[in-house]
Amino acid sequence: MSKTPDLKPRKSPTQARAAETVRIILEAAARILEARGLAGFNTNAVAERAGVSVGSLYQYFPGKDALTAALIQRDGEVLREEMAAAARLPMARAALSGMIAAAVGHQLRRPILARLLDIEESRLPLGEQQDEKTKELQDLLDQVLARVDLPAGLSADTAGADLFAIVRGMVDHAGSRGEVDATDLQHRVERAVFGYLGLA
């Protein structure tokens, strides 16, 4: 029986210098993943790239799975901030376009990293915290859809769940195929979303 990986950071940085060290370690981890893939991703390589000792890395992260979980959390926070900003736009169509742009940008800004984090997100036992983060994104979408006249017979819950699946499915699949044209992908996702809503 395999041991459950320890995903929690050992300690949180409390001073600016420590926070900068953690930022450097996480960026080094991201760059190692992009350059070497999952097979070449280990704490020694990350520490060397970050310019810190392995001992310093282990002060904050118990292993590579904890580093990966922290990267997933970091990238998720950026996506949620961008989605929330888009959701605040006054016109629902512009808000939906902004949310689609955020999702596409998140996947294609650093496509190799995004693909690998998607793989690891499905492997690691991230649990309720990750479920809550997904629910936050769904709630943002639902808030925007509350300002849209939905087609007759379509409930808000169904529309929200369907559109979340459409956007996530199209964007993640484009990333897994190695697509790099964000403008083209955004237009395709918008056609699917606005067509579903009868806004095309």
Image: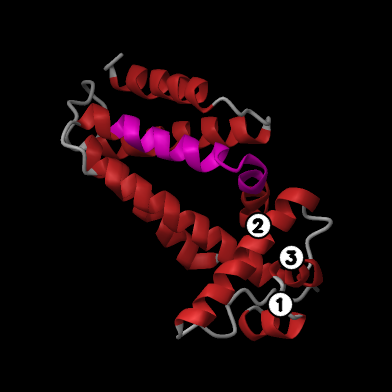
Query: Can see residue 125?
Result: no
Q: Nearer the viewer, residue 133 or 13?
A: 13
C-alpha separation, residue under disc 1 versus residue under disc 2: 15 Å
Give the residue type at disc 1.
Val
Q: Nearer the viewer, residue 4 or 28?
A: 28
Earlier in the chain: of badge 3 and badge 2, it is: 2
Earlier in the chain: of badge 1 and badge 2, it is: 2
The segment highlighted magenta reads 96-115
Is residue 38 found inside the magenta-colored segment of the image? no
C-alpha separation, residue under disc 3 versus residue under disc 2: 10 Å
Q: Is residue 20 above or below residue 79?
A: below
Residue 182 location (% of width, % of height): 52, 28
Give the residue type at disc 2.
Ala
Q: Is residue 139 left or right of residue 38?
A: left
Looking at the rendered structure, the secondary structure element under dot 2 is helix
**Identity of the residue drawn at 60% across and 30% down:** 174
**Identity of the residue drawn at 72% across and 69% down:** 64
Residue 168 location (% of width, % of height): 49, 37
Q: Which residue is mark 1?
A: 52
What residue occupies the far top of the structure in this picture? Answer: 200
Q: Which residue is mark 3?
A: 49
Residue 97: quadrant of the picture:
top left
